[in-house]
Amino acid sequence: MSKQKKAAVINDISGYGRCAITVALPVISKLKVQCCPVPTSIFSNHTAFPTYYFDDYTDRMQPYIDQWKALGLTFDGIQTGFLGSRKQIEIVARFIQDFGREKTIVVVDPIMGDNGKRYITYTNEMCQEMKRLVTFADIITPNLTEACILTDTDYHEEKWRLEEIRNLARRLSQMGPKKVVITGIPQGEYIANYCYENREGQTMAEKGQFLRTMKVGTQRCGTGDIFAAVITADAVNGVDFEVSVKKASAFIKKCILKSIEMEIPLTDGVCFEEVLDTLKA
């Protein structure tokens, strides 16, 4: 008898604003994978609001994880999101080493920056630790800024050439992950993801492709978390990587369009609940 797949998701919990575990849990569940959260911190609402309550969970992460170890739990997938300190990155690296099995899919969303700049909370030391964490991954989902940070590449505002993007993806894959998707690449009226696979031992050892969609609306929080959630659930379900990237992009576009239609405030993220029934495993 086949068992249901399980994925551990290591990220913060934001009570209001639709991001992090708050969106990952329903999306992964809709794709018929059990989502098992490991909280890194608790927010009353995300930080784009003028005020918020914050509880750092760092010192409680290891005792929480130790209970899972004592129970002998196993996971088909492990996904990491925003990590707020060097200590948290170290804890997550140990988690992957302790719970990763031969067939466990590890997805790292290296949330470090955007628009050419790293987040103010991200130190040089944390960037180096994130580079180490990426070596444990099977799949990574950096945006263009994060891809540059991880590869020590200068970011530029001018149009990125295909060869530049391909080289970024190749260098990221050489760090460990066999599958890389660089997200949010601006291409005029389009936004693109570059999907790259290193297929060792196969006739076509390397595959890369731009997947473009028309830009809609304004950037909203939580879309990257939804994207990573779809990629994670699909990976443990054995869905083809390119198919999964297309699915995630199309679903996010639906979410944004519905949010515009319903006049959802930008701070409230995307109303994915309205279109969740269209997401299929």
Image (cartoon, rainbow, N blue to C red):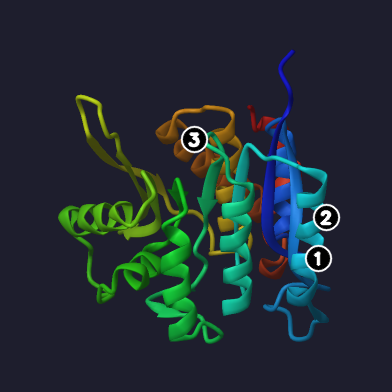
Residue 210 place in picture, x, y as percent = 30, 44
| Label ID, residue 67 | 2
Taking 193 as reference, is 85 above or below it? Answer: below
Q: Mark 1 and mark 3: span between their CA atoms?
A: 34 Å
| Residue that label 3 marks | 244
Q: Quadrant of residue 275?
A: top right
The residue at the point 50 percent across, 44 percent down is: 249
Q: Nearer the viewer, residue 70 or 210?
A: 70
Taking 231 as reference, is 264 above or below it? Answer: below
The answer to whether the residues at label 2 and label 1 have Cβ atoms under 8 Å apart is: yes
Is residue 222 in view from this perspective? Answer: yes
The quarter of the rendered structure image containing the N terminus is top right
Crowdedness of circle 2 by 10 Å Cα count: few (<14), some, many (20+)? few
| Residue that label 1 marks | 63
Is residue 275 in view from this perspective? Answer: no
Crowdedness of circle 1 by 10 Å Cα count: few (<14), some, many (20+)? few
* Residue farthest along the front direction in this orientation: 70
Q: Nearer the viewer, residue 223 or 188?
A: 223
Q: Is residue 172 left or right of residue 83?
A: left
